[in-house]
């Protein structure tokens, strides 16, 4: 059994994937804009991830834009039969690297076709609709029109499954009246636990939850407690943060990203870490301490 197999598996639509996957966002340039500093290393990271057993890659054509999907295509096409590729639509990038909503029928249709072209696919395994009512977090607003567009593209055979990103529990419930929602992708980590109740609800329903910024994103997690637990376990703090997410609930799928093969190996090794009950209790207290 490889390290990665120890993370277990979970359903993502009609696919079964290992719970520790790979997020491609960091393969683009600074600010997720433009080309990477080292394209050859980006290609090498992707190839090593798949060779190590990763079977779930998260990406988007607005990373770059277009950059990460083109690198994935170069590195991995033709794709292994068991590789599940998940992308996001609902935003575009301005010339100033800004993130702008793109919810119209024309914009969403173009985004799906751009993803297909740049990835070299006939159909996308999962397309997540990224809500953009507030770039910084979930905010209420109707997703009926954009979800209806994606459901139509799904009926045309261009999309296999649909998920949601940056959304509220109400938006998920409303979305399910339009189409099956196979996964939810929101910000969640040791210090950012606003989705605790939602994760439990989705787990009871058998729906995958994919936390973005599992390691804190642009502001990496920093906690004395996390560092102490990591030292006790002879692991890095970020490995322990990933291990905590794996232990939190079985429907959590992880997509830590990196542009370095060394960091990739560290991330994948998190599947090997078993957290004692006492360590889980200490880690669970981080968010509460942060709120005080």
Image: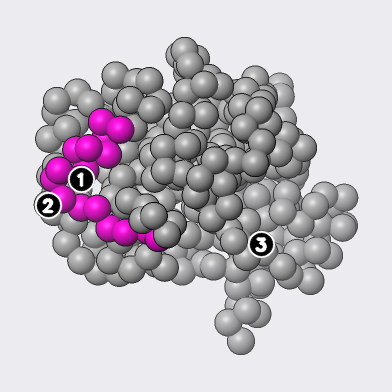
Q: Which residue is mark 2?
A: 145
Q: Earlier in the sequence, mark 1 or mark 3?
A: 1
Q: Is residue 235 above or below residue 96?
A: above
Q: Residue at x 14, y 25 (%)?
A: 156
Q: Does residue 231 appear left or right of residue 175 in this picture? A: right
Q: Earlier in the sequence, mark 2 or mark 3?
A: 2
Q: Which mark is residue 128?
A: none
How many numbered marks appear?
3
Q: Which mark is residue 220?
A: 3
Relative image position of residue 52 (x, y in whole percent) = 67, 24
Q: Is residue 197 above or below residue 34?
A: below
Mark 1 crowd level (few <14, some 14–19, many ≥20, 10 Å Cα): some
Q: Is there any visible trace of residue 202 in the rendered image? A: no
Q: Residue at x 45, y 45 (%)?
A: 63
Report if the CB atoms under discs 1 and 3 are less than 8 Å apart. Answer: no
Q: Residue at x 32, y 27 (%)?
A: 116
The boundaries of the magenta stretch are: 98-114
Mark 3 crowd level (few <14, some 14–19, many ≥20, 10 Å Cα): few
Whole-Å distance between the Cαs marked 1 and 3? Answer: 33 Å
The one of 50 and 45 positioned closer to us in this rendering: 45
Q: Is there any visible trace of residue 243 in the rendered image? A: yes
Relative image position of residue 113 (x, y in whole percent) = 25, 31
Whole-Å distance between the Cαs marked 2 and 3? Answer: 35 Å
Q: Which mark is residue 107?
A: 1
Q: The residue tagged with tag 2: helix, strand or loop? A: helix
Q: Earlier in the sequence, mark 1 or mark 2?
A: 1
């Amino acid at each position: 059994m490889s390290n990665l197999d120890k993370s277990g598996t979970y359903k993502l639509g009609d696919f079964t994937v290992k719970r520790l996957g790979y997020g491609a966002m960091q393969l683009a340039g600074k600010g997720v804009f433009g080309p990477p500093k080292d394209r050859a290393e980006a290609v090498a990271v992707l190839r090593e991830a798949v060779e190590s057993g990763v079977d779930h890659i998260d990406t988007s054509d607005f990373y770059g834009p277009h950059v990460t999907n083109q690198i994935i295509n170069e590195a991995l096409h033709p794709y292994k039969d068991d590789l599940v590729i998940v992308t996001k639509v609902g935003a575009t990038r301005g010339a100033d690297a800004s993130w702008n909503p793109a919810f119209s029928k024309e914009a969403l249709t173009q985004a799906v076709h751009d993803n297909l072209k740049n990835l070299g696919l006939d159909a996308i395994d999962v397309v997540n609709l990224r809500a953009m009512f507030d770039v910084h977090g979930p905010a209420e607003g109707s997703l009926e029109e954009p979800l209806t567009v994606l459901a139509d593209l799904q009926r045309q055979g261009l999309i296999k499954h649909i998920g949601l990103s940056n959304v509220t529990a109400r938006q998920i419930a409303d979305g399910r009246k339009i189409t099956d929602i196979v996964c939810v992708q929101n910000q969640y980590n040791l210090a950012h636990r606003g989705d605790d109740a939602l994760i439990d609800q989705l787990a009871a329903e058998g729906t995958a939850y994919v936390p973005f910024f599992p390691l804190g994103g642009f502001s990496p997690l920093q906690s004395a407690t996390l560092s102490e637990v990591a030292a006790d376990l002879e692991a890095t703090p970020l490995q322990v943060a990933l291990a905590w997410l794996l232990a939190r609930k079985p429907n959590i799928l992880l997509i830590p990203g990196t542009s370095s093969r060394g960091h990739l190996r560290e991330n994948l090794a998190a599947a090997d870490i078993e957290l004692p009950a006492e360590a889980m209790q200490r880690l669970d207290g981080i968010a509460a301490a942060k709120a005080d």
